[in-house]
Image (cartoon, rainbow, N blue to C red):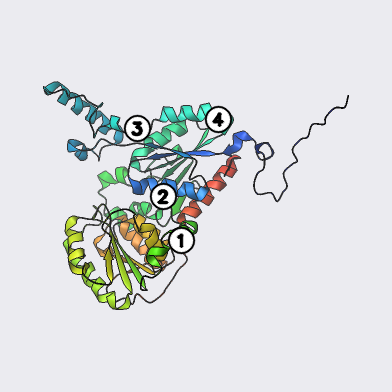
Amino acid sequence: MRIKPILLPEPPSPTAARGTPDIFESGVHTLVRRAVVIGNGFPSSENHSIGLLRALGLSHDHLLFRVTRPRGGIDDWLHWFPLSLHRKFHYLISMFRAFSSKSNYLPLTSHPNGLSSILQADANHIVNLARETYEKEGPLLVVASGRDTISVASSIKRLAPDLVFVVQIQHPRSHLNRFDMVITPHHDYYPLTPEGQKQVPKFLRRWITPREPPDSHVVLTLGALHRIDFASLRSAAIAWQDVFANVPRPLLVVNIGGPTKNCQYGVDLAKQLATSLISVLGSCGSVRISFSDRTPQKVSNIIVKELGNNRKVYIWDGQEPNPHMGHLAWADAFVVTADSVSMISEACSTGKPVYIMGAELCRWKFTEFHKSLRERGVARPFTGSEDISENWSYPPLDDTADAARRVHEALAARGWKLKI
């Protein structure tokens, strides 16, 4: 009887880039195939995490969990409290309402603004997921962003340190060793500078300033992480070609946010912005203006009143599809209000001229952010005297890709690697 030989797979070629069996790579228990995102319900914050995963090649292999605070009524006044304390107050208030009301009020089960209406991130659940799938899927990458996610992300690291790699985006203020990596803008350390210390009362410093200097597992960026890269801009350029290919050039895109506690402005800035835009219209082929969800009605009303009837100006009405990606891909220059680190960071990732409006109205760490951009030649103040046809450039901000490289390096130091 002739015995049929058993054919074993060939060892991988040193130059092979794809299709290598896991057994020849590093072993199933050292390959990171999937990720968990822990968000706080705010798109800008969750985009930090998703942008990092995109840069890592895991944008389609992740689960999204959310840590969401109760909202509405008195809960809007409690958002300054730590999340755990806020939840306790919410529960007590809900119980008080239930016992004091004659109606069939059901606390925490049917309240549209309560916690139970949204799937909550639970550290034990995510740890169990990591344990149950470790043998088949390998370690789990956990990426969290925002203040409210800190306790969940740190608990996951504490409960399963050998099964997960935890990345916390935005500064957790203290105990940085609770995470495998912290990714935060450089201006988050502004409170430690002499200028920052002057602005913080001594009795508040331990609560609102970083307590530890950055070490090797803290990655400092200039701006915010996001989803914008060369590939996404190229895809957007193709997708929006029919809309923008014949638009008169140069195309100036104006992104207007809204006031924050550290960048307070109102109708005065809107009037100044409108006047400045009218001043540069002569050097523009066309102007496209977008408002954010945070833009006050009184601000948008002034812009629409002053510019809405100009033939060179198009103001997006907020209806889908959102042209934001098309704007980033096709614009020749940008004007962005100073309040949004994310909007400014995205514009600065294109390498095109970026002008910032209203930086003089900002304070605290925002001043450090704007100063860093100016010093690197990435952005300039918008004054209304600019020639928009002037095509100045700079090396595009690449914070997300830089952060992704640091994640790769940290995983390699542990003996792990991403399976893309």
Upstream in sequence: badge 1 or badge 4: 4
Q: Which mark is residue 119?
A: 3
Type of residue at label 2?
Thr
Q: CA distance from mark 3 to mark 2?
A: 27 Å
Upstream in sequence: badge 3 or badge 2: 3
Is disc 3 in contact with disc 1, using a CB cutoff of under 8 Å? Answer: no
In-image side of 75 versus 164 (left or right): left
Q: Which mark is residue 134?
A: 4
Residue pointed to by mark 1: 238
Return the x and y of residue 19 as percentages of the image width and height: 65, 44
Residue 114, compared with residue 194, is above or below; it is above
Type of residue at label 3?
Leu
Return the x and y of residue 290 as percentages of the image width and height: 29, 60
Type of residue at label 4?
Tyr
Upstream in sequence: badge 3 or badge 1: 3
Upstream in sequence: badge 1 or badge 2: 2
Is disc 1 in contact with disc 2, using a CB cutoff of under 8 Å? Answer: no
Q: Secondary structure at mark 3?
A: loop
Q: Extreme right residue here?
A: 1
Is disc 3 in contact with disc 2, using a CB cutoff of under 8 Å? Answer: no
Return the x and y of residue 57 as percentages of the image width and height: 52, 47
Q: CA distance from mark 1 to mark 2?
A: 33 Å
Mark 3 crowdedness (10 Å alpha carbons): few <14, some 14-19, many ≥20: few
